Amino acid sequence: MVDPLSRARAFHRLLYLAIAALILFLRLLPVNPAGHSFPGPDLMMAFTFAWLMRRPDYVPVLLIVTVYLVEDMVFWRPLGLWPLIMLLATEWLRAREESLRDLPFLLEIALIGGLWFVMVLARHLILALVFSDTVPLGMELLRLLATLAAYPLVVALSHTGLGLRRAAPGEVDDFGQRR
């Protein structure tokens, strides 16, 4: 018999994979309603961080790295650079999960925005250092702003539509492990 916590974790991990597959499929469609003037948000990054801030046990390291490695392969980006940056950023947040649990939402957005800025800047600098083609930094920052604007909507959808809530302080499973 499977305990409810394991079932919830497995369900949300599969749901995360389904969301990643849907976003990847939509990004591959040859339709761009916004044109080329303003880049759209990186919804996968917004979902990853929204879920990580609420329930880090639902998005394990291997799942995050796998999703972004597949993205690198599909979009012909330098293989492994963005998954490595995502790994470092998500693990930095995961290590501070307990102290960030009661963070007000506006401060959460500011923290996530600052972290995203550092991530985008690190990728841009690393690619420039090895003389690889890079997206203009201005376009990357516009995409970052679009992602930051979409973040509250992603959090609201995750909370109301998908039932993703923060674990209560002291909440444990049947084995005494923190949730």
Image (cartoon, rainbow, N blue to C red):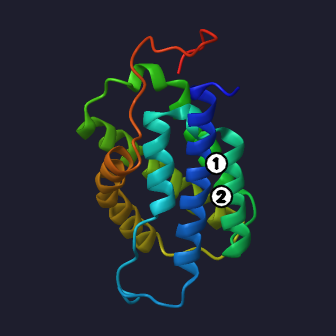
Bin the neighbour count of mark 2 within 10 Å (Cα to Cα): few under 14, some 14-19, many 20 and up.
many
The quadrant holding residue 50 is: top left
Q: Residue 109: x, y in percent?
A: 31, 44
Name the amino acid, label 1: Ile
Instruction: Give the image location of residue 84, x and y in percent.
Output: 68, 49
The tally of labels here is 2
Which label sits on residue 64?
A: 1
Check contact, mark 2 vs mark 1: CB within 8 A: yes
Lateral position of residue 108 relative to residue 178, left or right? left
75 relative to 47 in the view: left or right: right
- Name above or below for residue 27 compared with residue 179: below
**Disc marking residue 68:** 2
Q: Residue at x 30, y 56 (%)?
A: 153
User: What is the crowding at mark 1: few (fewer than 14 residues within 10 Å), some, or many (at least 20)?
Assistant: some
Q: What amino acid type should be assigned to the residue bearing mark 2?
A: Tyr
Residue visible at 66% across and 66% down in the picture: 71
In the displayed structure, 164 sits above or below 136; it is above
x and y percentages locating residue 149 in the rendered image: 29, 59
Q: Can residue 94 be spotted in the picture?
A: yes
Quadrant of res 167 = top left
Kind of element beneath mark 2: helix
